[in-house]
Amino acid sequence: MISSYWGVWGDVPNHLVRLALAFLFALPVGWNRERQARSAGLRTFPIVAIASCGFVILAIEILGERSTAQARVLEGLITGIGFIGGGAILKAERAVHGTATAASIWNVGVVGAAVGFGYYDLGLILALTNFLVLTVLTPLKDNPGEPSKNEAGPPDAGTRSARTPEVPP
């Protein structure tokens, strides 16, 4: 049913299913990042996925299902999500942190877009792969023979602070 006041209501069930699937597919990735105490987590990832899905659904509804103008919507979506992901990357001294979180944000945006276009299998595969990479490969990231970040002491352990008074021998 289309009216100038109420809009399009006939597609509500379809839209709700797509938005719910985008949310559900992104949830495990957000849970993993939250559990790892990363800069983005349980709230950010599902929001990125449903927003991406919503942009795509809107593009389909406004531009048509097979419109080439949807490429511009995807370009803007990729750029915007890249900007959000860039905020998750932190540089401290010689170390860079948050690249996996940033890449996951970008991936979850693609998950939402895929679901929005109706490619549920692609969205599910991307989400599952993202989750498995974060859970299975993270323990392999630590170098053998070196203490992991969880086993090491505080970052300044063994170093003297400028405020530490010198004790005469």
Image: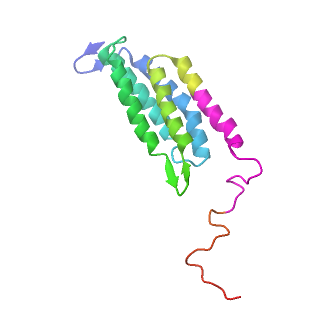
Whether residue 11 is visible: yes
Q: Residue at x 54, y 29 (%)?
A: 24
Q: Position of residue 49 (x, y in %)?
A: 47, 31
User: Looking at the image, which is closer to me, 12 or 66?
Assistant: 66
Q: Quadrant of residue 152?
A: bottom right
User: Looking at the image, which is closer to me, 61 or 17?
Assistant: 61
Q: Position of residue 95 (x, y in %)?
A: 56, 52
Q: Position of residue 38 (x, y in %)?
A: 56, 47
Q: Quadrant of residue 3?
A: top left
Q: Residue at x 57, y 28 (%)?
A: 127
Q: Which residues are magenta?
A: 127-153
User: Looking at the image, which is closer to me, 43 or 64?
Assistant: 64
Q: Residue at x 31, y 18 (%)?
A: 69
The C terminus lies in quadrant:
bottom right
In the image, residue 39 above or below residue 71:
below
Is 143 one of the magenta-colored residues?
yes
Q: Residue at x 48, y 40 (%)?
A: 44
Whether residue 42 is visible: no
In the image, residue 72 above or below residue 103:
above
Q: Residue furthest bottom?
A: 168
